[in-house]
């Protein structure tokens, strides 16, 4: 059923907690719906208002992407009243699945609304260059990285930019591409399918990794790729890993994905996360004080989609409850979204996280090397080891290769001064502590 497909697609864009708490509670009212009018029902007014405020536009966008029809989405409280069609005396048209006509881009995904930091600078610069000169500077472009870091934002920013220049753009997920392929193959309308995906100026495809082991679809995509490339049309793909690491991908496709430019996106550094939160608040008209912003940035991990979802969630709760968003209010609302804290932290847990996050070898942290970045990583390691474990100063001195406990004491004094005098440094240490405490 199309309504089930829509909610499944929505599930991929939001956190599992939000899906279980809200979306799983609503049901599609097929009798009251029609091709351009979708009615969903919720068990109570609170959930109905929440879903309406936060998700109705997303539902409309997904439906339009699948059908080419922009619908009105109604979210209402489930009642036992007579159906609309009965009370009005009108018989609503039977709900049907219209034929897909086009794809859609989220207009809020632009280069101006994308927050740039060292973790995504390369991918952003490449995407912007491609948007300005499609099929001239780099083709294809392959952007990869973990989920929730902005790949979809970047690929759609390319689409919105070239669309404003009058070019024909097709944006889709590889799942939708596969669904379209299967539907048209079954109905012997492959000419229509090929016209849709091959007669365009720019083809944008998200989550190409799901093409893995889909032999028949890979064959069709191979020919689609060749057709577009030979006609100097731009191709942009995203995935959660580079082409060589996508298992079950034909070698000829892997080779073509590597013809152009490959750009990766890393988890954002703390400063970028704070900037993203502030940008999200600015765009959505949400006020959060610095205490709340810093709490979200240091406790929510690196998934930007989850961070933005938490902000919307927090603002909606405050609005519905007529509450000011204080730090205590934020902690209470977000307690289920903050990862459970580990117990019995080991020294190696601390060193491994610091090594990864600060890009310093574990062996260097425990060495006598004195370069600035290694000294800082070592000091943070000592501070967090002393804070999060029951190890004595002599045992820490032994672990970190120091002369005796007085060296540990000196480092503790120095880092406490830095924490008290440098807010950015304090937040960095707090973020590292939360990552160490978070379960994987």
Image (tube, rainbow, N blue to C red):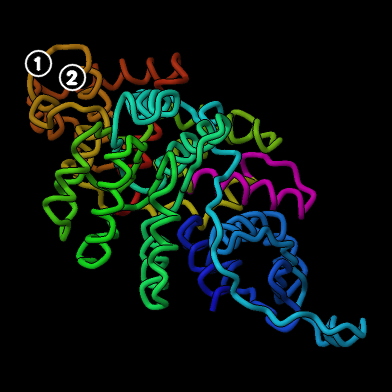
Give how far across and how far down residue 183 sits, in percent: 42, 73
Task: Give the position of the N terminus as an image quadrant.
Answer: bottom right
Q: Is residue 377 magenta?
A: no
Give how far across and how far down residue 367 sits, in percent: 7, 23
Give how far across and how far down residue 208 sits, in percent: 31, 52
Circles 2 and 1 in contact, beta carbons < 8 Å:
yes
SS majority, magenta: helix
**Near-viewer residue (103 or 267):** 103
Q: Secondary structure at mark 1?
A: loop
User: Residue sitting at 57 percent across and 67 percent down?
Assistant: 21
Q: Secondary structure at mark 2?
A: helix
Residue 254 in view: yes
**Near-viewer residue (156 or 314):** 156
Residue marked by disc 2: 374
Read off the magenta span: 306-328
**Near-viewer residue (220 or 398):** 220
User: Residue sitting at 49 percent across and 54 percent down?
Assistant: 337
User: Residue sitting at 44 percent across and 18 percent down?
Assistant: 420
How many marks do you count on the picture? 2
Residue marked by disc 1: 369
Give the label on residue 432, or none: none
Q: Is residue 308 magenta?
A: yes
Q: Is residue 395 left or right of residue 115?
A: left
- From this view, report whether residue 346 is shown above or below residue 188: above
Q: Is residue 344 left or right of residue 318?
A: left
């Amino acid at each position: 059923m199309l309504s089930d497909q829509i909610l499944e697609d929505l599930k991929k864009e939001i956190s599992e907690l939000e899906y279980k708490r809200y979306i799983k509670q609503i049901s599609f009212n097929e009798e009251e719906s029609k091709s351009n009018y979708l009615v969903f029902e919720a068990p109570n007014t609170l959930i109905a208002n929440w879903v309406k405020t936060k998700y109705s536009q997303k539902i409309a966008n997904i439906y339009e992407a699948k059908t080419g029809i922009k619908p009105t989405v109604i979210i209402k409280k489930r009642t036992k009243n007579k159906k609309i069609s009965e009370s009005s005396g009108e018989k609503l048209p039977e709900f049907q699945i219209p034929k897909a006509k086009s794809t859609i881009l989220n207009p809020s995904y632009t280069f101006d609304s994308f927050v740039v930091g060292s973790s995504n600078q390369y991918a952003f610069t490449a995407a912007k260059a491609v948007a300005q000169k499609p099929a001239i500077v780099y083709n294809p472009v392959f952007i990869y990285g973990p989920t929730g870091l902005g790949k979809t934002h970047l690929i759609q920013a390319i689409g919105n930019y070239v669309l404003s220049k009058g070019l024909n753009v097709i944006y889709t997920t590889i799942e939708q591409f596969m669904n379209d392929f299967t539907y048209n193959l079954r109905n012997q309308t492959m000419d229509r399918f090929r016209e849709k995906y091959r007669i365009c100026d720019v083809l944008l495809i998200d989550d190409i990794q799901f093409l893995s082991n889909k032999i028949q679809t890979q064959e069709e995509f191979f020919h689609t790729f060749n057709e577009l490339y030979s006609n100097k049309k731009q191709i942009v793909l995203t995935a959660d890993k580079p082409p060589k690491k996508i298992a079950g991908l034909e070698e000829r496709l892997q080779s073509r994905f590597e013809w152009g430019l490959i750009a990766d996106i890393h988890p954002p550094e703390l400063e970028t996360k704070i900037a993203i939160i502030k940008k999200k608040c600015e765009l959505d008209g949400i006020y959060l004080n610095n205490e709340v912003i810093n709490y979200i940035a240091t406790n929510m991990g690196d998934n930007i989609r989850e961070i933005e979802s938490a902000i919307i969630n927090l603002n909606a709760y405050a609005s519905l409850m007529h509450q000011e968003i204080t730090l205590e209010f934020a902690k209470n609302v977000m307690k289920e979204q903050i990862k459970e804290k580990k117990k019995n932290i080991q020294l190696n847990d601390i060193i491994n996280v610091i090594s990864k996050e600060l890009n310093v070898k574990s062996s260097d942290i425990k060495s006598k090397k004195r370069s600035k970045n290694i000294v800082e990583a070592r000091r943070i390691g000592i501070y967090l080891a002393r804070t999060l474990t029951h190890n004595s100063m002599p045992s820490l001195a032994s672990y970190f290769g120091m002369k005796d406990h007085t060296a540990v004491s000196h480092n503790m004094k120095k880092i406490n001064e830095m924490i008290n005098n440098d807010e950015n440094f304090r937040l960095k240490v707090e973020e590292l502590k939360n990552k160490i405490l978070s379960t994987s």
